[in-house]
Image (cartoon, grey):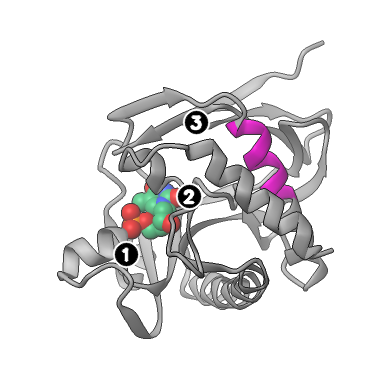
């Protein structure tokens, strides 16, 4: 019997696992930007993002970060622990770019005196509005203790990923994380891929991420392939 489709996201579908503790994430080729305003099918993106996410989640697990990753079932399907997703996106920034540059009027690439952490409500209808910690606790989306755990994990993940990408001659500019609860523990969930990160080539500044799609820079998949190639070369495992 086919596994039941639980949820269709913009670039992934989630299916029930064979037991109550797991689910299956399928990485699709769909690409969207501007909260769904721009759409395309990029043949091969699902395979690339699945492999990049699996390499990064294995590396993070090996370095003490609990994630929902269990194993790859095939090229696009990942077996994951079933989690209750915490309804905030956590954004980590090492350099100014994207919405941060726009909102605060600072050129992209401006160095930051400290790592920036932002929280956004996960809501397509509301356009993922930014939230502060008191708003998150007031609405019962997460407790202060859970926020502290997510912040601590996000900073540890940033240190680990920044070091790994540095070995790939890639600057990790910013990225988005999602967390979930499994057996009362907070674990890293969702994906980490060029869809959810900004990657700049260290030597040239070339964008190697979804900004190539958002900004019509061309050769989106060539950039994703290059990230995977360099990650494999860096042998993080
Ligand atoms: P932003 O500059 O558009 O706020 O994005 C910051 C980082 O978070 C960037 O690497 C893209 C990623 N991101 C997502 O993956 N999903 C989202 O919904 C948003 C808003 C950002």
Q: Quadrant of the C terminus?
A: bottom right
How far from the left and from the top, in percent, is residue 19?
Answer: 83, 32
Q: Secondary structure at mark 1?
A: loop
Disc 1 under 8 Å from ligand 1? The reply is yes
State which mark lies toward you, 1 or 3: 1
Q: Is residue 109 visible?
A: yes
Cα distance between the residues tagged 2 and 1 = 13 Å
Question: Would you say residue 56 is visible in this rendering?
Answer: no
Q: Give the mark nearest the N terminus, 1 or 3.
A: 3
Find the magenta span and give its range. 45-54
Report the front residue among 140 and 207.
207
The furthest residue to the front:
204
- Between the residue at mark 1 and the residue at mark 3, the CA separation in whole angstroms equals 25 Å
Where 182 sits versus 221, above or below? below
Q: Secondary structure at mark 2?
A: loop
Can you say whether 111 is above or below 207 in the image? below
Q: Position of residue 162 (x, y in %)?
A: 59, 73
Circle 3 Cα neighbour tier, 10 Å, few/some/many (<14 / 14–19 / ≥20) = few
Would residue 50 be counted in the magenta stretch? yes
Q: Which residue is mark 1?
A: 97
Question: Does residue 19 appear left or right of residue 193 in this picture?
Answer: right
Ligand 1: give its quadrant: bottom left
Looking at the rendered structure, the secondary structure element under dot 3 is loop
Disc ID at residue 9: 3
Residue 172, disc:
none
């Amino acid at each position: 019997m086919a596994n039941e489709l639980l949820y269709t996201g913009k670039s992934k579908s989630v299916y029930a696992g064979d037991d109550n503790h797991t689910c299956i994430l399928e990485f699709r080729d769909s690409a969207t930007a501007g909260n769904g305003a721009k759409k395309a099918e990029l043949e091969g993106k699902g395979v690339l993002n699945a492999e990049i996410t699996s390499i990064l989640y294995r590396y993070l697990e090996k370095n003490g970060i609990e994630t929902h990753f269990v194993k790859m079932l095939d090229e696009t399907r990942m077996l994951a622990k079933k989690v209750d997703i915490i309804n905030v996106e956590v954004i980590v920034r090492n350099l100014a770019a994207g919405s941060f540059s726009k909102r605060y009027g600072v050129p992209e690439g401006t160095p930051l005196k400290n790592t920036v952490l932002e929280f956004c409500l996960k809501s397509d209808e509301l356009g993922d509005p930014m939230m502060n910690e008191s708003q998150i606790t007031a609405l019962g989306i997460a407790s202060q203790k859970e926020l502290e755990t997510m912040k601590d994990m996000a900073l540890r993940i940033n240190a680990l990923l920044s070091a790994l990408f540095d070995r790939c001659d890639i600057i990790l500019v910013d990225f988005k994380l999602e967390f979930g609860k499994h057996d009362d523990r907070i674990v890293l969930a969702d994906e980490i891929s060029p869809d959810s990160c900004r990657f700049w080539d260290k030597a040239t500044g070339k964008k190697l991420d979804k900004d190539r799609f958002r900004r019509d820079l061309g050769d989106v998949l060539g950039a994703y392939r290059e990230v995977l190639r360099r990650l494999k070369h860096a042998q993080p495992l």
